[in-house]
Image (cartoon, rainbow, N blue to C red):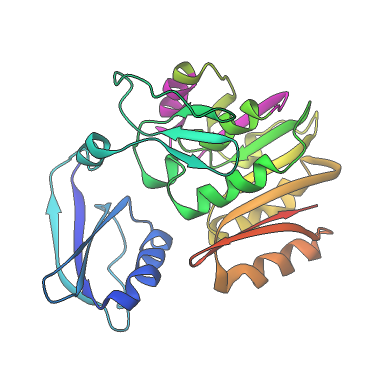
Amino acid sequence: MPHLRRIYALPPDLEESAVAFLWMAGTLGVQSTTDADGRVRLEAWFPLESEPAERLPGVELEREETVPDTDWFAAWRERARPFPVGRTLFLDPREPDDAPFEAPEGRRLLRLPARAAFGTGSHESTALALELLEDADLQGRRVLDVGTGTGVLAFAALALGAASVTGFDLDPAAPFHARDNSALNGLHPRLFAGRLAAVRQRPLFDLALVNVVPEQILPEMPGLVRLLRPGGEAILSGILQERGRQVLDRMRGLGFIEKDRREAGDWVAFRVG
């Protein structure tokens, strides 16, 4: 399927906020380069049916074009190397037929061939969720992964001791990618494509993992809370710092308080219960 490519030019001090905005706007991937004059150029890819590009102060949209279907991450995967996340995980975004790296002592290897930056743990929002997850008590717990994508949080939860994980995503292709990754890692969450309403009401979950932008998930939070047992917790990521207070206020209204947080760049993640 063809995609839209939008090319932006901007000063370097706006790069981080511009990339964060593009992810919030639904980009499928962003590549950053620096020109000889020091200006940053961002190439961002979007679905063909995306909304018109919004104007960002100080950022110039140089051009927008339709390009044929391409595996945008192929070149990146060729250069990619495994990397540590938190204290206990070691993520490998390379192709399945590449020889696996040996994880450093004390770390668990997760193989997650790159299909999107949010799916490998390299994006700040996913890394923050993983850091909070490894500090949670997962032994014997039932976990719900909302917006599972490639399954990175679901696999991490199982690797860290969860008894079972159910993951779902609106993207019909996501569970297929996640099932491929399941075979690579020997970890087997229950996966489906669909909405929160399709999740069984019983038995209740101990922990919800929500790495989804607030606009998409806040309206569904009351329904999600009903799937958690009394005393259950949620890890919330995909949140820009400027939206953090809004998310916490919403969770307080549902009877939750902040128990922990992680921050990186423009992003913040919370563990609430």
Q: Is residue 5 shown left or right of residue 260?
A: left
Residue 168 sits inside the magenta stretch? yes
Q: Is 147 on the left or on the right of 91, as rendered?
A: right
Q: Is residue 115 left or right of residue 237?
A: left
Q: Position of residue 208 (x, y in %)?
A: 69, 42
Task: Give, as a single range, the part of the protein colored magenta.
Answer: 161-182
**Residue 194 visible within the image:** no
Residue at 44% from the left image edge and 18% from the top image edge: 184
Q: Is residue 114 left or right of residue 209?
A: left
Mark count: 0
Residue 216, image x and y in percent?
A: 54, 56
Judge whether 245 appears above or below 106 on screen.
Answer: below
Residue drawn at x 31%, y 51% as measured from the top left = 29
Q: Looking at the image, can residue 77 be seen?
A: yes
Vertical placement of 241 versus 109: above or below? below
Query: Which quarter of the picture shows residue 244?
Result: bottom right
The N terminus lies in quadrant: top left
Asked which quadrant contains residue 171, the reply is top left
For this orientation, the residue located farthest to the front is: 105
Which one is in front, 229 or 113?
113
Q: Is residue 183 magenta?
A: no
Q: Residue at x 79, y 25 (%)?
A: 140
The location of residue 25, given as percent across then percent down, is: 39, 62
Q: Residue at x 17, y 40 (%)?
A: 69
Q: Where residue 177 sits in the image (x, y, percent)?
A: 41, 28
- Residue extending farthest bottom: 57
Is 148 in front, or is 270? 270
